[in-house]
Amino acid sequence: MSTLRGRVAGLPDWDRCAVMGVVNVTPDSFSDGGEWFDPELAVKHGLDLVAQGADMVDVGGESTRPGASRVDEAEELRRVVPVVRELAAAGVAVSVDTMRASVAEQAVEAGARLVNDVSGGLADPAMIPVVATHHVPLVVMHWRGQSIDMNNRAVYADVVGEVVDELARSVERAVAGGVDPQRIVIDPGLGFAKNAGHDLALVAHLARLRSLGRPLLVAASRKRFLGRVLAGGEGAAPPPARERDAATAAVSAIVAREGAWAVRVHEVRASADAVRVARAVEEAAQAAGAPVGGTATTTGTK
């Protein structure tokens, strides 16, 4: 295991950056809304992602794209729990992507091994007690509010410093609520209450995020900031989400080299290859006695 990226109690100890494949059981996700809405298709897609190199599969039943409205609890449960149950029964390491404690609890009872809460436990006060009671790992993401208006909250004087500070407070709340700190993963929340410049600054300063001392999940897949980069100029139209997979794999290689514990991606194969190449480079650097990771500057950004 690399001490650079850390270990999450209750999950396998991968010897490289892990790959989390995305299964959106939704009709309206920004990337693939509707394609895997049928539970049978969602399960098949999850198994396909594992065959392509995913170490985990993240199942979500509620879109968190900018401007999205929430679905009701019963509908989210209907979408998520059967898919989690089937994938877990097939031996897949399943994560449940939810902000609701009731969904997290039923998904864990159905076999999920990780709760990925984009609100970091802030959206539902029952989330932290549920995670603590069930002794499962928790992803604590940086979050400033619901998707419907989160773009209005993308205001920072020092985005890296503020994200680090706000994440630290969320981790403290989780630990105070009984969650084992060795089961906490942090996520900078790329695209959530952030513009393209903010996202790029966070990717460039992963060492600051790793200073919190917890494994780091990076979810850059197909996001708007990559579209802005690929558009090539102010005012130019970004490519569709599905045409951002090569850019996603580039980010996967960068953050794996900088010590990310895992990447969350829609198209698995390219990122699975990217993290394995990053690990080979890491091993070569170690053999030569060179420093590994942590090369990003630690100065703040304005």
Image: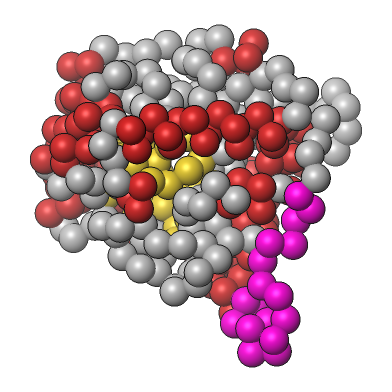
Residue lying at the far right of the rendered structure: 233
Q: Residue at x 22, y 16 (%)?
A: 73
- 47 lies left or right of 208: left
Nearer to us in this view, 33 or 93 = 93
Q: Position of residue 238 (x, y in %)?
A: 74, 32
Q: Is residue 284 magenta?
A: yes
Visible in this render: residue 254? yes
Q: Position of residue 16 (x, y in %)?
A: 49, 69
- 60 lies left or right of 284: left
Residue lying at the far bottom of the rendered structure: 287
Q: Is residue 128 magenta?
A: no
- Name the image quarter holding the C terminus: top right
Visible in this render: residue 33? no
Q: Residue at x 63, y 83 (%)?
A: 286
* Stretch of the chain drawn in magenta: 281-298
Q: How many marks?
A: 0
Q: Is residue 130 above or below residue 217?
A: above
Q: Is residue 11 above or below residue 281?
A: above
Q: Position of residue 163 (x, y in %)?
A: 62, 32
Q: Residue at x 63, y 43 (%)?
A: 243
Q: Is residue 220 above or below residue 172?
A: below
**Render colour scheme:** secondary structure
Nearer to us in this view, 19 or 131 = 131
Nearer to us in this view, 104 or 38 = 104
- 92 lies left or right of 16: left
Which quadrant of the structure image shows residue 134?
Answer: top left
- 198 lies left or right of 67: right
Which quadrant of the structure image shows residue 259?
Answer: bottom right
- Name the image quarter holding the N terminus: bottom left
Q: Residue at x 45, y 58 (%)?
A: 19
